[in-house]
């Protein structure tokens, strides 16, 4: 595998090469990331994985400094997966001057749900992904559905900026007990790890209750969402939100909508976990 650390070397590789798929990551790779690589390999002859812990998407006080950095292990995993190219710039290489130009997602999408609790997060994500796309110039890019709202922000960015890139979604990869794989799961103590599948279980129950309401023609799901937060609180979590939304635009569903997604975010001890569950009614 070729490891590229400078923007100019990465851009130099673009000429005359095969159809290319990009898998943007912040490293600390787990089987969920490797599944995105596998999907990328199905769509293109050349796969470029990017590894960059993007300070723009961390709020002050969040875990930018302590975010797990496991470069050697990540390289070994990517080599074993048959990845040809890893683009792993330093902070100074990607942001040689303050990144004052930003890619600003629409507030209706970016200030809701995750954006309400992590203001500016999606601007940071959109800015770095736009920049990485300009450097790698992929034909295809693969993102996980675990970060459901992020996937939607990127799809909308690519569409509205007419970027010639197909965005492909990878299903969330889960541990045997249902916990969605995430680099932040490593922050959980053994006791918290045992409790962590409760978020997924709560979303599943919420989905069943919301589905019954929508099928009965009732679209006010506020009580059901509050009940889910209450259940999390009673189990020792600090919920940010549990919300039932349309898959198409993450707005609240009407009784006619059949494709919905239940999204949730909650803290267990010092760790903030997110998850979601798509439902076809
Ligand atoms: O999902 C992530 O790991 C990050 O948000 C991404 C897309 C690599 C941008 O930094």
Image: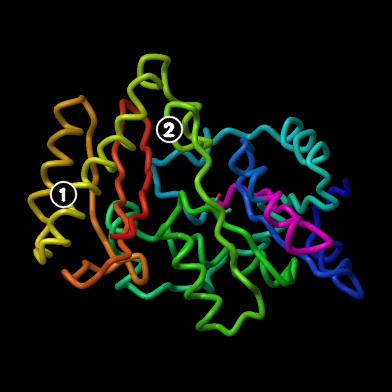
Q: Secondary structure at mark 2?
A: loop
Q: Image quadrant of residue 168?
A: bottom right
Q: Nearer the viewer, residue 187 or 256?
A: 256
Q: Which residues are magenta?
A: 37-54
Q: Image quadrant of residue 127?
A: bottom right
Indicate the position of residue 150 as horizontal and vertical percent values: 45, 60
Label of residue 159 in the image: none
Q: Secondary structure at mark 1?
A: helix
Going by the image, does 236 lie left or right of 18? Answer: left
Mark 2: few, some, or many residues within 10 Å (few <14, many ≥20)?
many
Indicate the position of residue 217 as horizontal and vertical percent values: 10, 66
Which quadrant of the figure contains the C terminus?
A: bottom left
| Residue topped by disc 2 | 179
Q: Image quadrant of residue 6?
A: bottom right
The residue located at (59%, 68%) in the rendering is: 167
| Residue topped by disc 1 | 225
Indicate the position of residue 280 as horizontal and vertical percent values: 33, 59
The residue located at (9%, 64%) in the rendering is: 218
């Amino acid at each position: 595998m070729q490891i590229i650390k400078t923007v100019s070397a990465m851009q130099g590789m673009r000429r005359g090469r095969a159809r290319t798929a990009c898998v943007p990551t912040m490293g600390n790779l787990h089987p969920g990331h490797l599944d995105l690589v596998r999907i990328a390999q199905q769509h293109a002859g050349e796969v470029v994985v990017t590894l960059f812990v993007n300070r723009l998407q961390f709020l002050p006080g969040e875990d930018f400094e302590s975010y797990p950095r496991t470069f050697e292990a990540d390289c070994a995993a990517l080599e074993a997966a048959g990845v040809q190219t890893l683009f792993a710039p330093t902070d100074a290489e990607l942001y040689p001057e303050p990144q004052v130009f930003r890619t600003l997602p629409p507030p209706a999408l970016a200030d809701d749900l995750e954006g309400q609790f992590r203001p500016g997060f999606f601007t940071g994500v959109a800015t770095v992904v736009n920049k990485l796309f300009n450097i790698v110039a992929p034909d295809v890019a693969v993102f996980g559905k675990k970060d459901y709202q992020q996937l939607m922000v990127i799809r909308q960015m690519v569409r509205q900026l007419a970027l010639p890139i197909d965005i492909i979604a990878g299903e969330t990869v889960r541990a045997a007990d249902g916990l969605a794989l995430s680099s932040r799961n490593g922050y959980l103590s053994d006791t918290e790890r045992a409790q962590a599948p409760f978020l997924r279980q709560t979303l599943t129950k919420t989905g069943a209750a919301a589905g019954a309401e929508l099928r009965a023609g009732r679209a006010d799901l506020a009580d059901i969402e509050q009940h889910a937060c209450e259940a999390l609180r009673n189990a020792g979590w600090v919920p940010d939100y549990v919300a039932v939304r349309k898959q198409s635009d993450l707005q609240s569903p009407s009784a006619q909508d059949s494709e919905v997604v239940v999204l949730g975010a909650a803290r267990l001890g010092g760790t903030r976990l997110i998850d979601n569950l798509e439902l076809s009614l």
